[in-house]
Amino acid sequence: MEEEFVRDELDEWVAEHMDEFVRKYRGNYLVIVGKEVIAATKDRAIAWKEAGKKIPAQIPYVMYIPKKTEENLLL
């Protein structure tokens, strides 16, 4: 149950910062740990690899910020 609480808290933090992420990271995969972006890359495999290097004992929160031309594809 504690992990669910932490994930909900992280989801809330991500939602609060989404405008900033869109401005800074369009077209990139973000690796987020403990309310901090620890990596941003255009390649999903590299994002996971970077996460594994930086936080090998944790499951990272990896998300993609769509390019402006991809936004309509999400609807």
Image (spheres, rainbow, N blue to C red):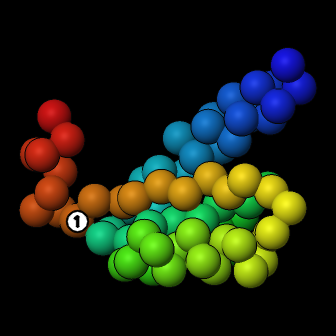
Instruction: Say left or right for 19 vs 59.
Output: left
Q: Nearer the viewer, residue 48 or 26?
A: 48
Q: Name the residue rendered at 62%, 53% in the picture.
A: 61
Q: Name the residue rendered at 17%, 62% in the picture.
A: 68
Instruction: Say left or right for 63 vs 56.
Output: left
Occupied quadrant, residue 48: bottom right
Occupied quadrant, residue 35: bottom right
Residue 35 seen in this snapshot? no
Instruction: Say left or right for 52 vs 62.
Output: right
Query: Where in the figure is residue 28, as x and y percent of width and height?
Result: 38, 72
Residue 13 seen in this snapshot? yes
Instruction: Say left or right for 55 vs 75.
Output: right
Up-down: is 57 above or below 53? above
Query: Where in the figure is residue 30, as x and y percent of width and height?
Result: 52, 66
**Local SS, label 1:** loop
Q: How many marks?
A: 1
Query: Where in the figure is residue 41, as x and y percent of width and height?
Result: 45, 80
Which quarter of the rendering shows the C terminus?
Answer: top left
Up-down: is 35 above or below 50? above
Looking at this view, name the residue that lies furthest to the top: 1
Query: Where in the figure is residue 63, as x and y percent of width and height?
Result: 48, 55
* Mark 1 lies on residue: 67
Q: Nearer the viewer, residue 5 or 44?
A: 44
Q: Name the residue rendered at 40%, 59% in the picture.
A: 64
Q: Nearer the viewer, residue 56 or 4?
A: 56
Up-down: is 40 above or below 23? below
Which amino acid, mark 1?
Lys
**How many C-alpha atoms fall within 10 Å of the one at disc 1: few (<14), some, or many (≥20)?**
few
